[in-house]
Image (cartoon, rainbow, N blue to C red):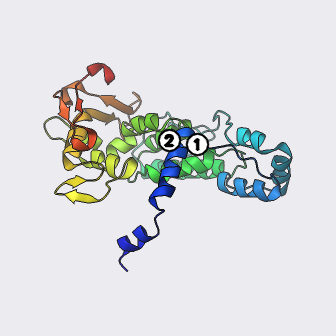
Amino acid sequence: MKRRSFLKSIQPNVATQAIKVEALKNGFSPYTGPWTKLETAHLLRRTLMSFDMDSLQKFTNAGLSSTIDTLFSTTPISDFPLNFDYEEDDEVPIGETWINAKYDIGNGVRNYRYQSIKAWFTGRSISGEESIRHKLVLFWHNHFAISDIRDGRYLWKYIMLLHDNFDGNFKKLVEEITIDPSMLRFLNGNQNTKRAPNENYARELLELFTIGKGEQVGPGDYTNYTEEDVSAIAKVLTGWRDYNYRSTSNEGFGSRFVPNNHDVTDKLLSHRFDKVVIKNNEEQH
């Protein structure tokens, strides 16, 4: 059996799908079943990186509602990646953080900062904090994946964006990740101009990050969007740039909107989006 035929054969029937859609629209009924160590462990395995018997007993005694409140509660992040032992970083003394220090092109500085942020990220993940935050940050990191970013400050900003939005509004998260300096570099958003639109990010935004293609039903036409939509959305996103990547400047780093590089024409989406016209609005940038 072909893979596509097999996957179709195990999909829920239409009636089951309709029930699930209705549940998503109206909300799910609260769980009212038993709350023993068995149910508690089931939930904790799916929400925490790890837990011990004391935590299991504590959450079982607390009850489901209190457990949920604890899992979604967080404390502000006050620990930052540090220069642990690299004495040759002239900008950052040992024991201090480098996240706002200017970049140094030396390989030693670059490498220790990479190792520092990895250690910080891993350490927080296995710290024992009783929060779903770490699993969701890892989930979003895998979903909005980046690669080949060689400036530790950029990576720090990207990770903090995920920490700040791990359980928030998905639309807001997509908006912020779209103009994150690491994502701008990774998927060429920083090369997207009105004179030469780059469709790389727009394509990933539709195909991987949000709605997905769906089956192809015609040339350049899929169930959920068309190639015309990729082109139009790329033009909507023209003009964004990251700045001071791997720079020794003390002027900071990040992303900014450059109006002269933005396509100000109206963008017409396809029949998949009911032929909506996106008009230019400088105030939105």
- Residue at horizontal 64%, vertical 50%? 125
- Residue at horizontal 61%, vertical 44%? 28
Where does the image place residue 134, in percent across and percent down from the top left? 61, 48
Viewed as shown, does residue 227 lie left or right of 170?
Answer: left
- Which amino acid lies under the numbered mark 1 shown in the image of this protein? Pro
Where does the image place residue 122, in percent across and percent down from the top left? 61, 53
Would you place residue 255 above or below residue 30 in this image?
above
Q: Nearer the viewer, residue 32 or 157?
A: 32
- Residue at horizontal 41%, vertical 48%? 106
Q: Which of pointers 1 and 2 lies earlier in the amino acid sequence?
A: 1
Can the viewer see residue 198? no
Would you place residue 249 above or below residue 200 in this image?
above
Q: Nearer the viewer, residue 134 or 39?
A: 39
Viewed as shown, does residue 69 lie left or right of 19?
Answer: right
Residue at mark 1 = 81
Residue at mark 2 = 156
Viewed as shown, does residue 170 lie left or right of 74?
Answer: left
* Labels 1 & 2 near each other (Cβ < 8 A): yes
Where does the image place residue 139, in percent across and percent down from the top left? 53, 51
Q: Quadrant of residue 163?
A: top right
- Which amino acid lies under the numbered mark 2 shown in the image of this protein? Trp
Can the viewer see residue 48? yes
Q: Nearer the viewer, residue 33 or 251?
A: 33
Count of marks, rendered view? 2
Task: Locate the N terminus and report the quarter of the image it occupies.
Answer: bottom left
- Residue at horizontal 83%, vertical 55%? 36
> Could you say whether the residue bearing mark 2 is in a helix, strand or loop?
helix
Viewed as shown, does residue 180 lie left or right of 12?
Answer: left
Q: Gap in Å between the C-alphas at discs 1 and 2?
A: 9 Å
